[in-house]
Amino acid sequence: MDRTATIEIVPTHPDFAAQHATKNNVHSSATLMASQMSQMSQMYPVQPIQYISPQYCIVREPLAPVSTNFNTLSQLPVPSIEEFLKKVDKDEGGTGNFVQFINVFNEQNISVKHIKDLDDNEFQLLGVKTISWRKTIKVAAKQYE
């Protein structure tokens, strides 16, 4: 308060003036409040509040330590083509669909790392004629990239 309040003049605090206004001085309280609000808006410009969706928020510091050296990331050891195809066969029900290709892959020196680069024609040359088998082998090999 600015210590100018008297019985005739309402205190300058807008909430106080609004709560203690009487019928005979409502007009003067409203006028005073309007002028005070005008002065406050000049001193403190109002900025609209905007809701920002969490997906657009920028996190300044990582929540957990982040490794920037990608060479130190732990990778699965790459199995031999025999171990790989046996594991794929076991994961797919142990029907023998995949272990049948062990010799052909070994004859062509195909390693697990090469599988991602094989196209459909090369798979067919290796005897993998079923589309689902090709897809299963490629998906399984991705974990060793």
Image: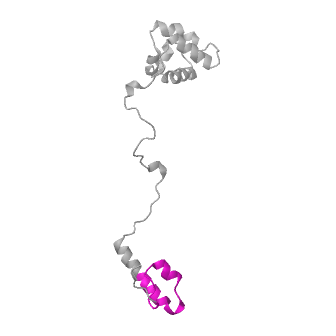
Image coordinates for residue 13, horizontal then vertical, percent: 45, 79
Residue 46 falls in which quadrant of the image? bottom left
Closer-to-camera residue (14/49): 14
Residue furthest toward the left? 43
Up-down relation of residue 63 to residue 73 (above or below): below
Indicate the quadrant containing the C terminus: top left, top right, bottom left or bottom right: top left
In the displayed structure, does residue 68 sit left or right of residue 19?
Answer: left
Closer-to-camera residue (145/67): 67
Image coordinates for residue 35, horizontal then vertical, percent: 39, 82
Q: Name the residue at 48% across, 8% down.
A: 106
Indicate the quadrant containing the N terminus: top left, top right, bottom left or bottom right: bottom left
Identify the colour scheme used: one colour
In the displayed structure, does residue 84 sit left or right of residue 33?
Answer: right
Image coordinates for residue 81, horizontal then vertical, percent: 50, 12
Closer-to-camera residue (106/46): 46
Q: Name the residue at 45% across, 83% down.
A: 11
Q: Give yes or no for residue 25 being in the magenta stretch.
A: yes
Magenta stretch in the rendered image = 7-34
Q: Give yes or no for residue 114 being in the magenta stretch.
A: no
Up-down relation of residue 71 to residue 32 (above or below): above
Residue furthest toward the bottom? 24
Which secondary structure type mostly characterizes the magenta part of the structure?
Answer: helix
How many discs mark residues in the rendered view?
0
Q: Name the residue at 44% across, 63% down.
A: 49
Q: Name the residue at 57% across, 16% down.
A: 87
Closer-to-camera residue (94/40): 40
Image coordinates for residue 51, horizontal then vertical, percent: 47, 58
